[in-house]
Image (cartoon, coloured by chain):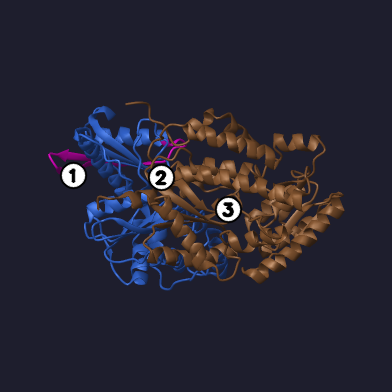
Chain colours: A blue, B brown
């Protein structure tokens, strides 16, 4: 049986297909596509791609699907949805059973989630409308420094010093970057300061939920080595390197929920009576 | 198996509810226009410490100022600072745009510095026929009730002098009885939500409460009587995934609760101010001096807000009590950004909830709902967390 999870974020859409062969669950395939104007179009493109990769004919080959991310309630053919906070927790836990804290850096938000020893979400924190610490912050800064996102990370790794940013706000930090540029500060040092600024933002969020090891970084920005190093320095521990692409963790969690909800529904249909007690 | 009924879905069939709902869509309701057309006068009230009973006894209709439909606060920028909350900014902006031109006067109290600033700016720039500012005690107790009774006497004289009416004891008693009946009917409606399958959603309950300050009280009372009958006749609704209590200061629009309840939760009860359960938790006594009885209700009897000193234990006990009574799974704390009173309380309540093992979600909001996507993610994740029984 195949189960799919779809994570529709602000900048990309991700789909993961799980192959459940008699209880042995593995990732059959995954896809990451740029976000379209409509979440449904993004989902369509990601599904087309991943179905092709998995040599599946159509959505009919999937036993159940579940959606997460900002567009989670916007796909007409997926009725099941779970928040990205819960999905990232579930996906990270599946990929690394020792995970107790998940820090997810999305395109327009950032979240810190702390789990119990059994994987239950104990607490979470999420940024408000502010873009500080998010992928959008990276985009704005890379644009200001006239480089690509991968180049921004590379620049930071070559820095000899760190040009500290006093603000984590995208708008004010951009002004600081421009001031540094006009002072003749090396691009590498400014890039290091940008990463340090984001790491501080993530650290404060992790502190707020009471982070504990093992700490897992998820989302597209988790591939940024300079950010990982800066964050490890503040957290005082090493971040776990997942055996899967950190960008698909949310979609993976959604796929696991699709499988779990399918099993629950099957159990309910077998049950003779329904409990009437208050939850 | 019959058709599943979503919580509150059947309420759309109630003509009384439809009328109450329609009355809150614009600053001036149809009922208020009819009152004005018949020569009635309307007194705008800022926030929830205004003795409406005195206004009703003077033959006037109290109207709680709400910037319903406001989309911006540009006109407030020149008279408020960045640390003033969005509530007062939007109220002032709407006032400057003439959206409250139907009021015949404005009454305010020293609820907080933001509200004082609003009153001062309103008075300085908008020509209302009548202004009154009530100094409301910061402490609760018998001396404060006595002091407030004296101030209510002054307010009564001001109304009498400005509007050419006499507020007799008989009229005041009738007004108190009318508002007490409204409180009793609201409690009756709220009590129905203690059941496993509440017939009315939190957003609908708030709609009903807001309507109470958007039209003449007798018209509202009659609609409320009918609504209680209608709701009693409704069938069992779908059981909510999670039962929540909402706690905070002022929410004067149901939009936030609609967003919260769209995530599988039901707001079964609240500890909110003027439009919430705190305002109808108990009745005003009519056994002694009526001004003192009214003052006593305002500063002693009804559940308190953080602006009243040394009331945290009572406030939290009230929330604990409704959580237990309504079988709540968790509490959602809401506070408008820059509201210092509720922001400080938020941290203390978080600690209290932690000690009591009450799951609690904090939501920072603005007066006009925004960032709905992130808000819904938070609420959905919270609901998933408190209903996750498998781990």
Residue drawn 60% across and 38% down? B224
Q: How far is the residue under mark 1 from the one under mark 2? A: 24 Å
Relative to B119, A91 lies left or right: left
Return the chain for callout 2.
Answer: A
Q: How far apart are labels 3 and 2 at the CA level?
A: 24 Å
Q: Do the residues labelled 3 and 2 touch (CB within 8 Å)?
A: no
**x%, y% of residue B28?**
71, 39
**Same chain check for tags 3 and 2:** no
- Number of dots carrying numbers: 3
Is there one chain holding both mark 3 and mark 1? no
Residue B208 lies left or right of residue A119; in this view the side is: right
**For residue B50, which quarter of the picture?**
bottom right
Provide the residue designation for mark 3.
B366
Q: Nearer the viewer, residue B134 or A186?
A: B134
Coordinates of residue A63 in the picture (x, y in percent): 23, 33
Q: What stretch is highlighted in magenta?
A: A18-39
- Chain letter for mark 3: B
Q: Compared with residue A186, is residue A145 higher up or lower down, i.e. above or below?
A: above
Please identify, in this view, whether the residue under mark 3 or under mark 1 is nearer the observer: 3
Quadrant hosting residue A277: top left
**For mark 1, what is the residue?**
A26
- What mark, if any, has residue A9 been given in the picture? 2
Quarter of the image for residue A239 reads: bottom left
């Amino acid at each position: 049986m195949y189960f799919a999870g779809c994570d529709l974020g602000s900048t990309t859409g991700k789909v993961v297909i799980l192959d459940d062969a008699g209880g042995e669950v593995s990732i059959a395939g995954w896809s990451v596509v740029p976000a379209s104007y409509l979440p449904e179009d993004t989902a369509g493109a990601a599904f087309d791609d991943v179905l092709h990769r998995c040599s599946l004919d159509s959505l009919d080959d999937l036993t159940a699907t579940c959606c997460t991310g900002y567009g989670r309630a916007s796909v007409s053919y997926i009725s099941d949805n779970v928040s990205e906070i819960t999905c990232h927790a579930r996906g990270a836990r599946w990929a690394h059973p020792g995970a107790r804290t998940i820090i997810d850096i999305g395109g327009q938000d950032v979240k810190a989630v702390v789990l119990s020893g059994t994987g239950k979400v104990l607490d979470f924190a999420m940024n408000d409308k502010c873009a500080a610490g998010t992928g959008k912050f990276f985009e704005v800064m890379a644009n200001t420094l006239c480089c690509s996102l991968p180049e921004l990370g590379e620049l930071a790794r070559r820095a000899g010093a760190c040009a500290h940013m006093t603000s984590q706000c995208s708008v004010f930090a951009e002004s600081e970057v421009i001031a540094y540029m006009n002072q003749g500060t090396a691009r590498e040092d400014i890039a290091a300061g940008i990463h340090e600024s984001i790491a501080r933002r993530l650290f404060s969020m992790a502190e707020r939920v009471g982070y504990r090891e093992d700490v897992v970084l998820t989302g597209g920005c988790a591939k940024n080595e300079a950010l990982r190093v800066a964050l490890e320095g503040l957290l005082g521990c090493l971040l776990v390197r997942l055996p899967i692409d950190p960008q698909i963790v949310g979609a993976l969690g959604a796929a696991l929920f699709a499988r779990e909800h399918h099993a629950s529904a099957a159990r309910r249909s077998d049950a003779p009576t329904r409990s009437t007690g208050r939850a | 198996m019959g058709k599943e009924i979503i919580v509150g879905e059947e309420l759309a069939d109630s003509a009384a509810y439809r009328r109450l709902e329609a009355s809150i869509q614009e600053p001036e309701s149809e009922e208020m226009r009819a009152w004005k057309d018949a020569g009635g006068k309307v007194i705008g009230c800022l926030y929830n410490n205004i003795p409406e009973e005195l206004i009703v006894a003077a033959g006037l209709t109290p109207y709680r100022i709400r910037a319903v439909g406001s989309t911006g606060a540009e006109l407030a920028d020149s008279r408020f600072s960045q640390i003033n909350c969005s509530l007062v900014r939007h109220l002032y902006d709407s006032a400057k745009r003439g959206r409250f031109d139907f009021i015949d006067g404005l009454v305010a109290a020293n609820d907080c510095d933001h509200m004082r600033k609003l009153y001062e700016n309103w008075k300085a720039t908008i020509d209302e026929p009548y202004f009154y500012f009530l100094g409301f005690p910061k402490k609760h107790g018998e001396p404060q009730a006595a002091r407030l009774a004296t101030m209510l006497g002054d307010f009564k004289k001001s109304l009498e002098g400005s509007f050419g009416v006499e507020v007799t004891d008989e009229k005041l008693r009738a007004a108190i009885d009318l508002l007490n009946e409204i409180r009793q009917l609201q409690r009756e409606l709220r009590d129905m939500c203690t059941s496993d399958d509440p017939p009315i959603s939190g957003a609908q309950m708030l709609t009903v409460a807001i309507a109470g300050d958007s039209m003449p009280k007798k018209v509202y009372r009659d609609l409320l009587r009918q609504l209680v009958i209608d709701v009693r006749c409704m069938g069992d609704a779908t059981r909510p995934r999670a039962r929540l209590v909402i706690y905070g200061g002022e929410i004067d629009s149901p939009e936030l609760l609609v967003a919260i309840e769209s995530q599988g939760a039901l707001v079964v009860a609240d500890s909110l101010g003027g439009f919430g359960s705190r305002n109808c938790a108990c009745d005003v006594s009519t056994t002694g001096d009526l001004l003192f009885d009214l003052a006593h209700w305002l500063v002693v009897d009804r559940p308190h807000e953080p602006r009243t000193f040394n009331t945290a234990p009572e406030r939290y006990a009230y929330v604990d009590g409704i959580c237990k009574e309504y079988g709540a799974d968790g509490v959602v704390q809401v506070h408008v950004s820059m509201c210092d009173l509720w922001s400080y309380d938020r941290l203390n309540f978080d600690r209290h909830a932690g000690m009591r093992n009450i799951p609690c979600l904090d939501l920072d909001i603005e007066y006009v709902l925004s960032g709905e996507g992130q808000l819904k993610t938070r609420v959905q994740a919270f609901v998933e967390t408190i209903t996750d029984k498998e781990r």
